[in-house]
Image (cartoon, rainbow, N blue to C red):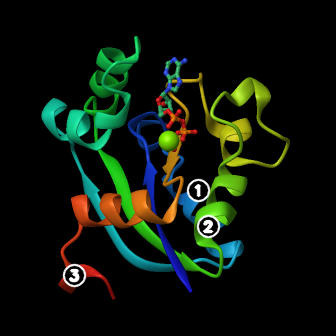
Amino acid sequence: MERTLAIIKPDAVAKRHTGKILEKIEAAGFRLAAMRLMSLSQRDAEGFYAVHRERPFFGSLTAFMSSGPCVVMVLEAPDAIRKWRALMGATDPAKAEAGTIRKEFAESIERNATHGSDAPETAAAEIGYFFAGMELV
Ligand code: ATP
Ligand code: MG
């Protein structure tokens, strides 16, 4: 079993796509190990996306991520990291394959509906950023 951090980003929550995205997650066979609705501060978002600090879109990305509530989750499945990224689709919805979450729900390369960890080390760090051990069920 593997765990990954997933976020339903503020664009998708505001558009009331949370239920539809959760349905796809469960239909794909993931088990929810943790879930919380929360509003990130700009600082929270900057800490989360610290690897992108030097990128030109960092200010805009962190403003977007702190613009409204998001749903933060831990998903569990065999090969969860790769499997969740495949279900999300490409970062840019214009390049995402049919049937993926970003193809269906993302507005733009920035406002792209969901987040997923990209490797075991980042998944562990991102899960620890949002959840204490006792919150993982
Ligand atoms: P995430 O880490 O959110 O799952 P990702 O791994 O597909 O997405 P990253 O390269 O890690 O993509 O970028 C992190 C986030 O930064 C993207 O999901 C998107 O919201 C935003 N982003 C990435 N590239 C751009 C860009 N060129 N312009 C604006 N925003 C961008
Ligand atoms: Mg990423």
Near mark 2 (Cα within 10 A), the count class, few <14, some 14-19 or many ≥20, is: some
Q: What residue is disc 1 on?
A: 21
Residue at image point 18% right, 41% down: 44
Q: Which mark is residue 25?
A: 2
Q: Nearer the viewer, mark 1 or mark 3?
A: 3
Marks 1 and 2 in Cβ contact (< 8 Å): yes
Mark 3 or mark 2, which is nearer the start of the sequence?
Answer: 2
Question: Is the Cβ of the residue at disc 1 closer than 8 Å to that at disc 3?
Answer: no
The image quarter containing residue 52 is: top left
Kind of residue sitting beneath label 3: Gly
- Dot 1 amino acid type: Ile
Q: CA distance from mark 1 to mark 3?
A: 25 Å
Mark 1 falls on what kind of element? Answer: helix
Q: Residue 133 — which label?
A: 3
Please state which of the two labelled residues, at mark 2 or mark 3, is closer to the viewer.
Answer: 3
Depth order, front residue of 137/24? 137
